[in-house]
Image: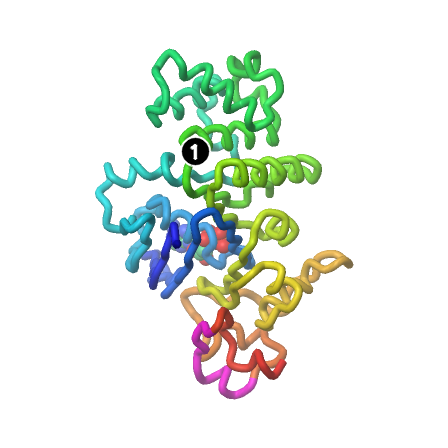
């Protein structure tokens, strides 16, 4: 059963340079208890997908389409109704945990506040519940750490704090947008382990956004590869990573192969000026006439006219 069903999502921004079309007809399904990763180069619209679900898009965004979560369309809910879902049934963690915490309140108070907001325990029990969450997310000496301020925590510990806050409600869906990107490698691995443990323990669904394909492989069963605001290939992660079919997926995987980072030739198209035909064709080594003329549909998880040939 689908927990989240995104259908025909369009997001445009009005800017001084004109209309920027970031998502056009984006579709995605997340089953209950499953984990899916959005991957793709910077600027391809991954964060905008997450912010659309959370209804946290900037003011200059125009949105249409459907985002069904447990049979309710999040896009048409009243502000008060979406607040009942955001941070309760759907929680999100971000790349920069420090920027999400208030520097003048103790870490413990901020976790306890999210426990209280969820109404899951009596007021005087919030402190204990927060300490329990700190323990659950692997923060050492939680009783002592409760009374410390964000600046007394390392980046990795702050991400654990954010995860504690996200977990306060035991959400059905956790959205993690580059949760390990700002951390150093050993800490990254610990946070990945923590997220993995939590999704298993609580049967949460995970929508992970990352440009780190290793992190994606570690955490997710499924993957959706995005290019210029669209999915170009999706499916079971092991299958897609072992046998990529779309030329962009192939290039993305090659770009992070063993001999370091090799950028994909050409540059990401400007969203205000997308090419005719397949949006990837100017960078595609296999492009033929039909790729320049007509835009491929997403069929059986692949958006390419020629994938069978190459
Ligand atoms: N408020 C905004 N106004 C105009 N364009 C925006 C705004 N926010 C994001 N964009 C554009 O949307 C595109 C997708 O952004 P984003 O989802 O953040 O990419 P990423 O895949 O790196 O997370 C980018 O090209 C970005 O410039
Ligand atoms: Mg992003």
Specify the segment rendered in magenta: 288-299
Relative to residue 201, is residue 82 drawn left or right? left
Q: Which residue is drawn at the image coordinates 59% and 35% (left, top)?
A: 194
Residue 146, above or below 40: above
Q: Does ligand 2 reach within 8 Å of label 1's beta carbon?
A: no
Q: Residue furthest bottom?
A: 289
Q: Nearer the viewer, residue 44 or 258?
A: 258
Dividing the picture into quarters, in which one does residue 113 lie? top left
Relative to residue 258, is residue 48 drawn left or right? left
Relative to residue 124, is residue 157 drawn left or right? right
Q: Nearer the viewer, residue 18 or 162?
A: 162
Residue 197 part of the magenta segment: no
Location of mark 1 (residue): 170
Residue 105 visible to an observer of this rendering: no
Q: Position of residue 173 (x, y in %)?
A: 43, 43
Residue 242, above or below 282: above
Q: Which residue is drawn at the image coordinates 29% and 51% (left, top)?
A: 71
Quarter the N terminus occupies: bottom left
Q: Nearer the viewer, residue 153 or 232?
A: 232
Q: Which residue is drawn at the image coordinates 51% and 50% (left, top)?
A: 35
Ligand 1 image-quadrant field: bottom left
Q: Residue furthest front?
A: 1
Q: Residue furthest left?
A: 78
Dividing the picture into quarters, in which one does residue 307 lie? bottom right
Q: Which residue is drawn at the image coordinates 55% and 13% (left, top)?
A: 143
Residue 193, above or below 20: above
At mark 1, the secondary structure is loop
Q: How many marks?
A: 1
Q: Position of residue 74 (x, y in %)?
A: 29, 48
Q: Nearer the viewer, residue 254 or 129?
A: 129
């Amino acid at each position: 059963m689908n927990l989240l069903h995104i259908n025909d999502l369009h997001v445009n921004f009005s800017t001084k340079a004109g209309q920027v079309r970031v998502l056009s007809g984006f579709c995605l399904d997340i089953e209950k208890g499953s984990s899916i990763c959005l991957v793709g180069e910077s600027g391809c619209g991954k964060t905008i997908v997450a912010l659309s679900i959370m209804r946290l898009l900037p003011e200059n965004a125009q949105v249409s389409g459907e985002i069904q979560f447990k049979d309710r369309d999040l896009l048409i809910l009243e502000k008060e109704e979406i607040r009942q879902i955001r941070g309760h049934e759907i929680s999100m963690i971000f790349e920069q945990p420090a920027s999400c915490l208030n520097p003048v309140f103790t870490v413990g108070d901020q976790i306890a506040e999210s426990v209280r907001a969820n109404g899951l325990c009596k007021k005087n029990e919030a402190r204990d519940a927060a300490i329990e969450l700190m323990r659950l997310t692997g923060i050492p000496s939680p009783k002592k750490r409760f009374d410390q301020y964000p600046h007394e925590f390392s980046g990795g510990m702050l991400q654990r704090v954010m995860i504690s806050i996200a977990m306060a409600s035991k959400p059905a869906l956790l959205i993690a947008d580059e949760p390990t990107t700002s951390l150093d490698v050993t800490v990254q691995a610990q946070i990945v382990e923590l997220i993995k443990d939590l999704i298993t323990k609580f049967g949460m669904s995970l929508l992970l956004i990352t440009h780190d394909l290793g992190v994606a492989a570690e955490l997710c069963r499924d993957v959706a590869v995005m290019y210029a605001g669209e999915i170009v290939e999706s499916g079971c992660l092991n299958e897609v990573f072992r046998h990529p079919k779309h030329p962009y997926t192939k290039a993305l995987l090659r770009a992070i192969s063993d001999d370091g980072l090799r950028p994909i030739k050409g540059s990401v198209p400007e969203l205000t000026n997308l090419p005719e035909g397949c949006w990837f064709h100017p960078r595609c080594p296999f492009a033929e006439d039909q790729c320049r003329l007509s835009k491929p549909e997403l069929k059986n998880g692949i958006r390419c006219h020629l994938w069978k040939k190459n």
